[in-house]
């Protein structure tokens, strides 16, 4: 587990990008994916963007946040996707449509403090033992932190040419 503290300017940039994502979704009348609830969408989009900044900061990679605005298939941070969750004990969620060869990082926290719990290639997390539907309306692969690889190995994976 790795902790990242964001600077006020990083928080402002991420919050702006997260809000822009919400506004764009409203403008395009996009429905929430995978059972997201209305009251959590702003919180999730803003913290999701801040989680992406935390991962980019850890990896030493530039995060624009606006460059891929509207591109629902773009990777969150060059070579990596990020999944933010509200509680430290929540699992990393993966969906069948997630690209198999992309690393996904599990992030929790609230500004300015974020925790990077680890990462996994989607194909390695999309296994039967992790398939669950605890709420009865949001089936997904729920990957526990114990199945994630350390963040230090992600940097090595990426430097070896993985998921670029």
Image: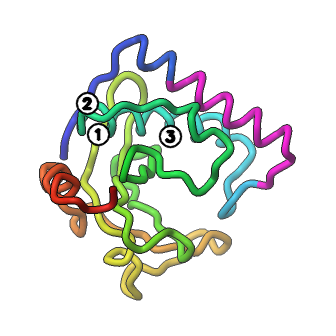
Q: Earlier in the sequence, mark 1 or mark 2?
A: 2
- In screen coordinates, is 106 left or right of 60? right
Residue 85 visible in rendering: no
The spot of residue 36 in percent (x, y) is: 67, 54
Q: CA distance from mark 1 to mark 3?
A: 12 Å
Residue 4's tag is 2
Q: Residue at x 41, y 19 (%)?
A: 10
Q: Earlier in the sequence, mark 1 or mark 3?
A: 3
Q: How is the image coloured?
A: rainbow
Along the viewing direction, whichever of 65 and 26 lies nearer the viewer? 65
Residue 48's tag is 3
Q: Quadrant of residue 54?
A: top left
Residue holding disc 1: 115
The local secondary structure at tag 2 comes to strand
Image height of 124 relative to 87, above or below: below
* Range of residues picked out in magenta: 14-31
Q: Residue at x 60, y 35 (%)?
A: 43
The 10 Å Cα crowd at callout 2, few under 14, some 14 to 19, many 20 or more, is: some
């Amino acid at each position: 587990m790795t902790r990242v503290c964001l600077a006020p300017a990083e928080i402002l940039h991420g919050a702006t990008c997260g809000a822009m994502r919400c506004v764009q979704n409203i403008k395009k009348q996009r429905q929430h994916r995978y059972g997201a609830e209305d009251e959590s969408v702003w919180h999730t989009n803003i913290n999701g963007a801040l989680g992406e900044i935390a991962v980019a900061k850890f990896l030493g990679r530039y995060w624009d946040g606006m460059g891929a605005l509207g591109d629902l298939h773009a990777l969150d941070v060059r070579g990596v996707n990020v999944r933010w969750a509200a509680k430290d004990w929540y699992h990393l969620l993966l969906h069948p449509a997630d690209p198999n060869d992309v690393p996904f990082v599990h992030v929790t926290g609230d500004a300015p403090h974020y925790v990077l719990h680890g990462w996994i290639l989607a194909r390695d997390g999309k296994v039967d033992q992790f398939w669950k539907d605890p709420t009865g309306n949001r089936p997904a692969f729920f990957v526990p932190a114990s199945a994630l690889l350390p963040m230090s190995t992600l940097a090595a994976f990426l430097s070896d040419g993985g998921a670029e």
